[in-house]
Each structure stands twice: as structure tokens, then as C-alpha cells.
Image (cartoon, grey):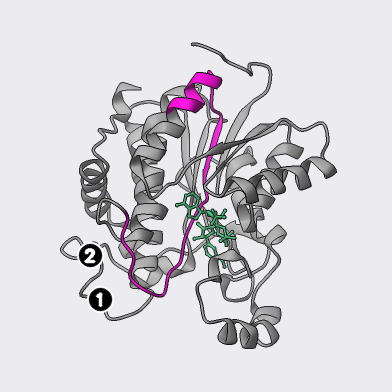
């Protein structure tokens, strides 16, 4: 492999590492000795975040690489660049996410939250999993949300044109992240691989995720709802770090905060909807994700 810059340290990628939960997860992985790649869209913001982290953790191996998860060509370009620099990947944290309150599509005319939160990560994982050593320390961590419980996968309406709730596309995308993680774990197990796939959600935290919401509503919530029900981004990152680092994780778990309404508290096993456990739906979602990203994801051939 050409131009590799790292062989001595374990390597992790965190998507959406420049703020919120991803920023905290990045720090957690650095403190555990990983060389971390911040896979981000807004490079100026990401370079600032990198400097901030390095000011606190100066001996860290940290770098920035560009990716726009809503754009499949950008995901492929990122994977190509990563492979030209690294010959291994130990942990992939599929963290980046968007929440919109108005309809948006990507350049392939796919609903933006489904494209970014699920399909971009599906494609990224398919392109990089071959770099993962066959060990239980090799992990794909996918970020879901409590919102997954409100949704189904609307196979006849993936762009959610017929859905009446404003947050239906976000909920569907986060359900897809959870079902992808489970299906990946089943496929890895079936293929006799030791690499594991785990999912986690951060509970509730006041992050950049809500930047598209009404500022007036957000200000009201910040004085009422937020202090009672939400926790800090540092605590919100804990279930994700547990999925990434805990030695007692076997694959297929779904972690989240176990306190008040599962919005905050100590990380542990999170509750899932019945629908999210449907293997027939997960298998169908996998096939459609391959079709929409134009990329075959053959776990058996790893
Ligand atoms: N906050 C919560 O209460 C909550 C609850 C449940 C689940 N989650 C999940 O937790 C994860 C992290 O969210 P957060 O709360 O930390 O939100 P955040 O502060 O908004 O962080 C999201 C990150 O995703 C990045 N991103 C967005 N679109 C992207 C794209 N097309 N390509 C590459 N990166 C992109 C953002 O980068 P830019 O700077 O370029 O925008 C940002 O770094 C998400 O998956 C979210 O769904 C959050």
C-alpha cells in the first residue's frame, strides 16, 4: 500500500468530529491512544476544532480529512485518500448527522437525512471495512437516536413525501442507522469474522444538531427543557465511547444513557423498538442501500 503514514498506532475515523458528540468522541479515542482522523465537511471549523484539541492533548496524532456524507462521490474520494495514507482502520465511528425541519434532497435526489445519516455511512463502511484487522477490537459504531422508535422504513416513500410529521425523515434515517448496524453484525457473524458492529445513541444534548430549528423555540427550550432533560455533550459521548472501547462488548449491542427518559445518565443497554428488530426489513434495507449508493457491500468476501 502506498504512502502509509501510520503503522504503530491504532487508527480511528470519527465522522462529524468537529463539534457536538463527535468532538468528545474524538478526544476520548485520542486519550485511549488512537490516531484519529476527523472526517468532516466544514474544514475551517474542523481545523479550529483540531487546534483546540491539540492545545489540550498536544502529543495526539490527529488529522483532518474532507468528506461530505451526502455526496457519494465525496465519500468515495475520502475512502481513496484514507487508503492511500493508512493501511489499517480499527474503529469507524459513523457519527455525523443532520436534522432538518424543511425538505431537502442531495444531488442524487435522495432525501438529505437518509442520504447523510444512513446511506453515506453505509457506503463509507463498505469501502473501508477491508482495512479492518479481523479482531473484536475492530469496530464499526453507528449512531442512532431515541427518534428511531417513532419510525418504520417507508420503502414506498423513502423520501418521506407522504409522511405528515416534520421529523419523519430524521426518525427514519436514525432507524436505518440502527438496522444497518444490526444487519452488519449478523453478516459479519455469518461470515465468521471477528470484527464487530455496535450501535449507540447519545440521549439528548444541546448540540449543533438543532441549528435549523427556530431560534426562538430553541431559546425557550434552553431555559426550560434542556437543563432538566438533557446532558452535556461530554456525557452524551459516553455510550458511543463504550461501544468503541469497552472490552466486554460482543457486537450487536445498542448502548445509550439509562437515566431519565433515556435522555441522560450512565451508559448501558438501550431500548429498541420492536420494528427495529425485524430482520426481513434490515435485509431489504441493506439491498436498497446497495442499490442507492451503487456499491455492493459483500461482507462474506472480506
Ligand atoms: N444531539 C442530540 O440530542 C442527539 C440525539 C440523538 C442522536 N444524535 C446523533 O448524534 C450524532 C452527532 O450529532 P450531534 O448532536 O453531535 O450534532 P452536531 O453537533 O450537529 O454534529 C453533527 C456533525 O455532523 C456533521 N455533518 C453534518 N452533515 C454532514 C455531511 N453531509 N458530511 C459530513 N459531516 C456532516 C457536522 O458537520 P458540519 O460542521 O459540517 O455541519 C457535525 O460535525 C448524530 O448522528 C445525531 O443524529 C444526537
Q: Main secondary structure of the magenta part?
A: loop
Which residue is pictured at 38% across the width and 33% down the height? 76
Q: Is residue 86 visible?
A: no
- Helix, strand or loop status at disc 2: loop
Q: In the displayed structure, would residue 220 be above or below residue 66? A: below
Task: Tell me the residue that label 1 is attached to.
Answer: 163
Magenta extent: 80-106
Q: How many marks?
A: 2
- The answer to which of 83 and 28 lies nearer the viewer is 83
- Helix, strand or loop status at disc 1: loop
Which part of the image, by quadrant, shows the C terminus? top left
Q: Which disc number belongs to residue 259?
A: none
Dot 2, how many residues are within 10 Å of its Cα: few (below 14), some (14-19), or many (20+)?
some
Evaluate if marks 1 and 2 touch, with contact meaning CB atoms under 8 Å apart.
yes
Image coordinates for residue 159, horizontal then vertical, percent = 25, 64
Image coordinates for residue 21, horizontal then vertical, percent = 62, 56
Q: Is 84 in the magenta?
A: yes
Q: In the displayed structure, would residue 155 be above or below residue 24? A: below
Dot 1, how many residues are within 10 Å of its Cα: few (below 14), some (14-19), or many (20+)?
few
Residue farthest to the left, as pictured? 156
Position of 270 compared to 182: left or right?
right
Image coordinates for residue 86, horizontal then vertical, percent = 55, 21
Position of 27 compared to 112: left or right?
right
Which residue is pictured at 58% across the width and 61% down the height? 202
Front tag of 1 and 2: 1
Q: Is residue 291 visible?
A: yes
Task: Tell me the residue that label 2 is attached to.
Answer: 154
Amino acid at each position: 500500500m502506498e504512502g502509509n503514514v501510520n503503522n504503530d498506532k491504532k487508527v480511528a475515523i470519527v465522522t462529524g468530529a468537529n463539534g457536538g458528540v463527535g468532538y468528545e468522541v474524538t478526544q476520548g479515542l485520542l486519550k485511549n491512544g488512537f490516531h484519529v482522523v476527523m472526517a468532516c465537511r466544514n474544514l475551517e471549523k474542523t481545523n479550529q476544532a483540531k487546534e483546540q484539541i491539540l492545545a489540550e492533548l498536544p502529543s495526539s496524532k490527529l488529522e483532518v480529512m474532507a468528506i461530505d456524507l451526502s455526496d457519494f462521490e465525496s465519500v468515495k474520494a475520502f475512502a481513496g485518500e484514507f487508503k492511500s495514507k493508512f493501511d489499517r482502520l480499527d474503529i469507524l465511528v459513523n457519527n455525523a448527522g443532520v436534522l432538518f425541519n424543511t425538505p431537502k434532497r442531495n444531488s442524487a435526489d435522495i432525501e438529505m437525512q437518509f442520504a447523510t445519516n444512513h446511506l453515506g455511512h453505509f457506503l463509507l463502511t463498505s469501502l473501508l471495512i477491508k482495512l479492518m484487522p479481523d479482531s473484536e477490537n475492530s469496530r464499526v459504531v453507528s449512531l442512532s437516536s431515541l427518534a428511531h422508535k417513532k419510525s418504520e422504513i417507508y420503502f414506498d416513500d423513502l423520501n418521506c413525501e407522504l409522511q405528515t410529521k416534520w421529523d419523519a425523515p430524521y426518525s427514519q434515517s436514525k432507524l436505518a442507522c440502527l438496522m444497518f448496524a444490526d444487519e452488519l453484525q449478523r453478516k459479519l457473524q455469518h461470515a465468521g469474522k471477528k470484527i464487530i458492529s455496535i450501535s449507540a445513541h447519545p440521549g439528548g444534548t444541546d448540540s449543533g444538531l438543532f441549528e435549523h430549528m427556530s431560534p426562538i423555540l430553541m431559546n425557550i427550550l434552553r431555559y426550560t427543557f434542556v437543563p432538566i432533560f438533557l446532558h452535556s455533550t461530554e456525557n452524551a459521548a459516553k455510550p458511543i465511547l463504550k461501544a468503541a472501547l469497552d472490552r466486554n462488548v460482543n457486537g450487536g449491542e445498542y448502548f445509550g444513557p439509562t437515566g431519565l427518559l433515556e435522555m441522560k445518565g450512565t451508559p448501558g443497554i438501550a431500548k429498541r423498538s420492536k420494528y427495529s428488530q425485524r430482520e426481513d426489513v434490515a435485509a431489504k434495507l441493506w439491498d436498497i442501500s446497495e442499490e442507492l449508493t451503487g456499491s455492493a457491500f459483500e461482507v462474506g468476501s472480506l
